[in-house]
Amino acid sequence: MSESLEPGAPRQGSLLRLLPLGVFILLAGLFLLRLFAGDASRLPSALIGRPAPPFALPAVEGIEGVPGFSDENLREGHVSLVNVFASWCAPCHAEHATLLALARDPALKDKGVRLYGLSYKDEPANARKFIEGDGNPYAAIGADISGRAAIDFGVYGVPETFVVKGDGTIAFKFVGPLSPQALATTLIPEIEKAMK
């Protein structure tokens, strides 16, 4: 004979069945909170105010006349920009026209600002095709096939752009594709701050 429950007594089985729903609602709430928590391009970097990590990257094979670069190039007394890109990255293609405009900016050229490209985990033939097809904004391009230099820079994903002072100190990190608006309102002011 089965035991009968008193009316109004809670059933343990029904509470356990609601537990996964409660966990799901809690996780969904946390995800939504993080989704609208702020500007993803403002991810913190532990390297801000510290020297660029040591690295030496060879030139991308097949791109004629464009050398590789190292951390020594970032300590030559001028502000440098290090743009981490890859041919397989759609946002990198989207920002490329902005980088070309940045490289042609006569005011920045007069101030000695140099743009370096860090080709992240890319096959040399694909990187070459990307640069030859869309144009080369970079003074030098280093092939980071293993991704080690990018890891040392604290790269979350491509594209990312670093502003480096003339003494090799990282001054600013921009995460995501550069647009003309981001260039004008964020990157150019950070470049000017790094010159002081």
Image (spheres, helix red, strand yellow):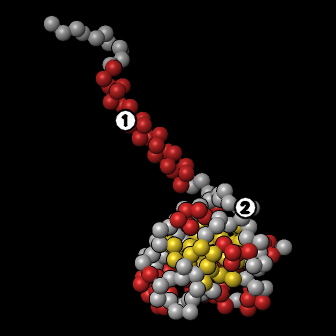
Q: Residue at x 59, y 73 (%)?
A: 56
Return the residue at label 2. 50
- Distance between mark 2 and mark 1 Cα atoms: 45 Å
SS for tag 1? helix
Describe residue 71's horizontal placement relative to residue 192 as left or right.
Answer: left
Q: Local crowd at mark 2 within 10 Å, few (<14), some, or many (≥20)?
A: few
Q: Quadrant of residue 115?
A: bottom right
Q: Residue at x 62, y 59 (%)?
A: 43
Quadrant in the picture for the N terminus: top left
Q: Residue at x 73, y 70 (%)?
A: 168
SS for tag 2? loop
Residue 174 appears in view = no
Q: Position of residue 23 (x, y in %)?
A: 42, 37
Seen from the viewer's position, the closer of residues 151 and 104 is 151
Which label's residue is closer to the chain start, 2 or 1? 1
Quadrant in the picture for the C terminus: bottom right
Describe residue 58's horizontal placement relative to residue 14 as left or right.
Answer: right
Q: Position of residue 108 (x, y in %)?
A: 74, 85
Seen from the viewer's position, the closer of residues 73 and 116 is 73
Q: Residue at x 52, y 69 (%)?
A: 158
**Front of the two marks 2 and 1:** 2
Q: Amino acid at mark 2?
A: Arg
Residue 193 appears in view = yes
Q: Quadrant of residue 8?
A: top left
Q: Local crowd at mark 1 within 10 Å, few (<14), some, or many (≥20)?
A: few
Return the residue at label 1. 20
Q: Position of residue 3 (x, y in %)?
A: 22, 8
Q: Amino acid at mark 1?
A: Pro
Q: Position of residue 155 (x, y in %)?
A: 57, 64
Q: Quadrant of residue 174?
A: bottom right
Q: Is residue 2 above or below residue 24?
A: above
